[in-house]
Amino acid sequence: MAALTKEETEALIQEVLEVYPEQARKDRAKHLTVNDQSLEKSNKCITSNRKSLPGVMTVRGCAYAGSKGVVWGPIKDMIHISHGPVGCGQYSRAGRRNYYVGTTGINTFGTMNFTSDFQEKDIVFGGDKKLAKIMNEIEQLFPLNKGISIQSECPIGLIGDDIEAVAKKANKEIGKPVVPVRCEGFRGVSQSLGHHIANDAIRDWVLENRDGDDSFPTTPYDVAVIGDYNIGGDAWASRTLLEEMGLRVVAQWSGDGTIAEMEKTPKVKLNLIHCYRSMNYIARHMEEKYKIPWIEYNFFGPTKIAESLRKIAALFDETIQAGAEKVIAKYQSDYDAVIAKYKPRLQGKRVMLYVGGLRPRHVIGAYEDLGMEVVGTGYEFGHNDDYDRTIKEMGNATLIYDDVTGYEFEEFVKRVQPDLIGSGIKEKYIFQKMGIPFRQMHSWDYSGPYHGYDGFAIFARDMDMTLNNPCWKQVKVPWKTAENSAVAVAASA
């Protein structure tokens, strides 16, 4: 199908909005737009970070998910207590494939579920004493843990458990960091506030722990990788490139991260932010308090990798700049071979994305390196500064949608007719049943890594494997079935 013009895209948005009542239609219209690269600020065309409309299907998560599931959960040598009913902890356990090195249950705990398992009596009488008892039991059963975080679920905010007091008392008793996080799920409009709350907890309870301690030897090339959650091994692939260019990665979190690395982060010379949405708050704090500059980087696809390596190197001396060029040259034959193999099979294919965090914009370059075109993108819980960064990455007249509803996404797909959709597990089976190739872009559909040059080869393979799988020939796409029926009716007339 040919690309839609600006007028056709605008008409499509209005057509999709027609089913809503007047007030809902006005509200949702603010979250859907046609991309215009000439704009510098996205707030002139799209609204974001607002409450989802009651009665529509949103795929957003909650503040607890943003804190425990994203920021704190991957810190591998701490035990993260889900304080509340058992379900939240179980749902957020091990689903994101945050790889780590260690022995689970001995010195790492990332895939385990620790919960206070609230019952009715805990709601009535409070859970403070139960929480204190749990932490004592944890210290006896898992003595090699390096600290504890308390991740509050919804009931905690409603009944008023004083988790800060419990944390301070436990800290004195066990002699390890105990971090209370007020991330009750009902806070805010999405998981985004959970990121912010988690960042604030790191600021207040962790980063200052080694202020005034100069025992850690530093170098001019010390950096921290923040906001890479090591999904499928992404952070390892990224770290390899940084170290090959001559930098020393002192801290990497949250993926495969430790609390010691978090505490050392104020000692570095530069913070490298992968997921801007979830970690820009702590980066800004360190810039203000410790005078540590930060930049956002993108290691998806060779074009963006080269851009990012050079941008990072420009902040250091000629040694690092030369190192960056050596790294780019070292891998050129590898990624040229990947492009030569897969681009002829993927050239011209059209993609629609709907993901969280950074992926709605960061992966665009990787698709373009393979000759593919992203014709629609949007964020589950983005803010306008995310869309500011997206406008220039997308082509003119392409669709941009914020907190898109299930109905809207399906209707857009029916009309735009992409060759591939990249979204989450909640959307996956709907679109597969519609006969559309789909990649789960939250956790790489059990694949990865996708970062770095090695990751690009896996990314290209996975896109080709999905799009060119012969199974799709056996599935009748709904709009093609309708077209065939209309032709048959016309022929019999």
Image: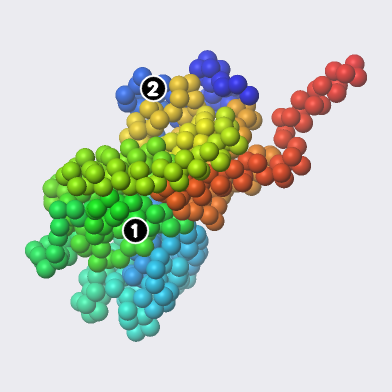
Residue located farthest toward the right when viewing the structure as drawn: 492
**Three-letter code, disc 1:** Ser
Q: Quadrant of residue 71?
A: bottom left
User: What whole-number distance in Å separates the C-alpha atoms at marks 1 and 2?
Assistant: 33 Å
**At numbered mark 2, what does the secondary structure look like: helix, strand or loop?**
loop
Looking at the picture, does residue 165 appear above or below residue 187? below
Question: Residue 37's mark?
Answer: 2
124 relative position to 164: left or right: right
**Quadrant where the image shows the N terminus:** top right
**Quadrant where the image shows the C terminus:** top right
The residue that disc 1 covers is 254
**Three-letter code, disc 2:** Gln
Q: Count the marks: how many?
A: 2
Q: Nearer the viewer, residue 389 or 53?
A: 389
Q: Which residue is pictured at 26% across the width and 47% down the height?
A: 323
**At numbered mark 1, what does the secondary structure look like: helix, strand or loop?**
strand
| N-term-proximal mark, 1 vs 2 | 2
